[in-house]
Amino acid sequence: MKLTRKGTSVQSGNALGLNRRQFLKNAGITTGGIAAASMLGAGMVRKAEAKAVSAEGPIEQVKTICSHCSVGCGIYAEVQNGVWTGQEPAFDHPINRGGHCAKGASIRHHGHSEKRVKYPMKLEGGKWKKLSWDQAINEIGDQMLKIREESGPDSIYFMGSAKFSNEQAYLYRKFAAMWGTNNVDHSARICHSTTVAGVANTWGYGAQTNSYNDMHNCKAMLFIGSNAAEAHPVAMSHVLTGKERGAKMIVVDPRFTRTAAHADEYVHIRPGTDIPFIYGLLWHIFENGWEDNDFIRRRVYGMEAIREEVKKYTPEEVEDLTSVSGEQMYRVAKMLAEHRPGTIVWCMGGTQHTVGNANTRAYCILQLALGNMGVSGGGANIFRGHDNVQGATDFGLLFDNLPGYYGLSEGAWKHWSNVWNLEFDWVKGRFDQGSHLGKVPMNTPGIPCSRWHDGVLEDKAKIGQKDNIRLAFFWGQSVNTETRGREVREALNKMDTVVVVDPYPTMAGVMHQRKDGVYLLPAATQFETYGSISASNRSLQWRSKVIEPMFESLPDHVIMYKIAKKVGMADQMFKHIQVNNDEPLVEDITREFNKGMWTIGYTGQSPERLKQHQENWHLFSWEDLKAPGGAVKGETYGLPWPCWGTPELKHPGTHILYDTSKHVMEGGGNFRARFGVEHDGVSILAEDAGSKGNYFQDGFPEFTADMLKQLGWWDELTAEEKQHAEGKNWKTDISGGIQRVAMKHGCIPFGNAKARVKVWTFPDEIPVHREPLYTPRRDLIAKYPTHEDMQVHRLPTLFKSIQDRVISENLDKKFPLVVTSGRLVEYEGGGEETRSNPWLAELQQEMFVEINPVDAADRGIRDGDDVKLKSPEGAVIGMKAMVTERVSVGETFMPYHFAGVFEGEELQYPESGGISTKPYVVGESANTALTYGYDPVTQMQETKVSLCEIVKA
């Protein structure tokens, strides 16, 4: 929206009403850059003052990593007398090479933000009361123990954070395990859970296969549901490098985004039609013989089923479904075929759907058909959102997994009990011992964070646990990121206790209508602690502490220890982790997860190796992340997982997954044998030699102790390794011996199999198009219906009954506009942190909805008008109208970063230290108006296709 004055006092001579482009242009040509806010009127945004620092003090330079998106930009923080006074983007960092976005450039503000919660607080009798840490921990711990006694451990919910370090994420999942629940989750559920499920079930791992840097080598780049220019601005430097070197850039999106402005080919698709679009491309690829048949024969299982399905998606059918003409579909397919290797990039535009898992599988199938996997310039470059959402996912902050994607089977729990050096029976005894809806809680996925509120509100006879959720921790995640805002508020009101652990109060602290039972615990920012984080490309980076915790805030792992001690499980939880003055030693946590994360190769990245990479980041190449010389010669920056074996083995990390041109000890690999050795009587092992130097020169299953014995390799283990390896496999042998011996013979420990395009454990074995629940095309429902209603893990999940209601109540007629949502470059996530930053708040001051000029004219709406957006589920939210051709006729767009207003009601934020914690910018949350809809595999929420009506306010 336009930059407009918010105050009434105006300095003479300062003209206002600048738009974003004018502001950035003016700011860029002044010596103060973005700090040149002198051209803004007084009263627009109050300046946040840092405490005065003596000019005589020495300036210390600290290497750290930006805490916003997943690109992983390096920063040099300047600290004087303990105060963070300045920063520079790291010009010698191998990922950002001196690049910064608006958020990164303003990162140091968090080190002195007056909007932060400054001490523990409690809502009592409608008033906020200051508490000591001891009092807060004692009261919360007593409430936890009371609820555990009355309702069981599953009545406590642990919402985690993509802002945790790896060590904190691991510790939080361990906390939930020690407490005895799988009711733990974090924001990956609502951003890339469908990616992890779809991709891992295609070729073995659910992560980005290549890297931002490797996009320099692409010949084609297909962006679908990704607006990297706003969501990952520094990544665009790599994208544009590839484009400058000749890559063709194709952007597929319902909205003409800033990324689309760079495209050689922009393709508009109707929201929710990704699968017909991909199948439409494959129709032309198969029709013209452009597929890589040799690659498919050697390394892919089930492609014939895709060929049959694709026959249904003729150019005429695809145009009707997607709005893309046959001519453009042919042109894009030919461009991809003639420019190989090519990569595909997707983000939440592809994942946040009721068919999200099928979308991501379809993207993978396209790459397999073209033979674009396991090669530089190819792959699936899946851009993650938050700085450590990759790491938090890897460390099992998920309702259906333990760290390392081990699942929840008894074998998985026994493995981690072994790592923790705890008796399995003790760990098992921490869980509810009953059976609910025929399932045992310890081995059953919990409640996802997309639907924690249903865990509070649903009839407890219909949920797979003893009782409803009664207390929830909202630890580093804001609840305005979840759809169905009215139910979220109702759930906050109903619970016994709400505990917010965050530098800021977040919406969980203010969205309710409570008078009592809300606690705010001030967590330190990630610049007030230290540890490792994992960028989107799977590289681990060590983030050093810049300043000591501000105010009375504490690092997350310290708070975890204090609560664990209060509820009586600290001795078990920290059995092999040194604790000093209530602070667990971060390096000990790293070493503990090194001991257990064999599945995905988080075992070779010791604290010492990670610190060495940080100290020498200038030695790594911007082209391929490899160090050509020096102390880390031959290693890939950040030791991207899998970094096999123990740290002593010195595996260099894996830059490109499934790359058969390299030896496994040089980062080579092949598709994982994760799904057995045959299906329907047909072998699914690769008909390919696999990674360079593979002993078998063919497909082979994953390694076990018995397999080593059969091969005559058992005696290559040491005596100690044999003791640990007996009866185990490559995933559960905590000595690493099985992995070491397998790799000695050139074999990747997880086997060599074909990628599969048929997932026989999913509701749809192959991807099929299903119309969105709130579809504007009722004529397509009979041919492309949604799923029947079903129970997904612990919760009943609606599909057909919602779609039927849309038709029976004519909701598609009453709410004729499609609404979708997405990011702005200035803000991130729920926006609590970034909207509390005055330097960013200057740039984007109002919630808005983009509406096409035709739809605006039909409603008498002009650019800048106040409008009301009405949801088919009842919510009505107010905002400004941005009339623009970025969106097509019949389609609208909202950013999802705003909050602080709820259906016209200005929410009340507490004061902390005599200063309001209310962000500088507030507005209605898009998710208040977004509607019911969940993926049947992961419970991803639908935020990219719903219906609305917009009227002038």
Image: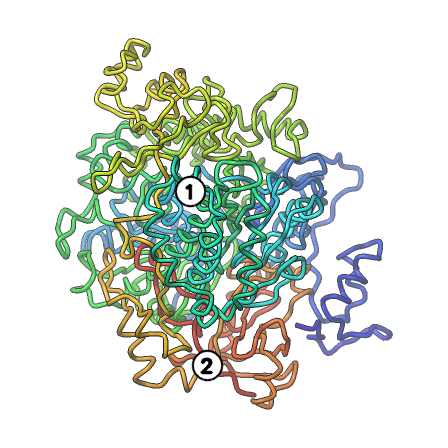
Vertically, is 876 above or below 767? below
Q: In the rendered image, which quarter contains the C terminus? A: bottom right
Vertically, is 377 above or below 905? above
Name, please, the residue furthest toward the right: 13
Question: Which residue lies at the image location 77% right of the left edge and 62% below the top edge?
Answer: 37
Q: Is residue 413 visible?
A: yes
Measured as percent of width and height from the top left, residue 796 is found at 23, 64
Q: Nearer the viewer, residue 717 or 25?
A: 717
Q: Is residue 539 left or right of residue 435?
A: right
Measured as percent of width and height from the top left, residue 853 is found at 62, 82
| Real-space Cα separation, disc 2 to disc 1, in angstroms | 36 Å
At label 2, the amino acid type is Val
Q: In the rendered image, which quarter contains the N terminus? A: bottom right
Vertically, is 629 above or below 497? above
Q: Nearer the viewer, residue 9 or 751?
A: 751
Q: Residues within 10 Å of mark 1 (few under 14, many from 20)?
A: many
Q: Is residue 531 visible?
A: no
Q: Is residue 187 left or right of residue 378?
A: left
Q: Is residue 456 left or right of residue 99?
A: left
Secondary structure at badge 1 equals: helix
Secondary structure at badge 2 equals: strand
Question: Which residue lies at the image location 34% right of the left edge and 80% below the top edge?
Answer: 806
Q: Which residue is mark 2?
A: 876
Vertically, is 358 above or below 777? above
Measured as percent of width and height from the top left, residue 405 is found at 34, 40
Q: Which mark is residue 169?
A: 1
At label 1, the amino acid type is Ala
The quarter of the picture where residue 455 lies is bottom left
The quarter of the picture where residue 752 lies is top left
Measured as percent of width and height from the top left, residue 877 is found at 49, 79
Answer with mark 2 or mark 1, whichever residue precedes in sequence. 1
Question: Which residue lies at the image location 57% right of the left edge and 75% below the top edge?
Answer: 888
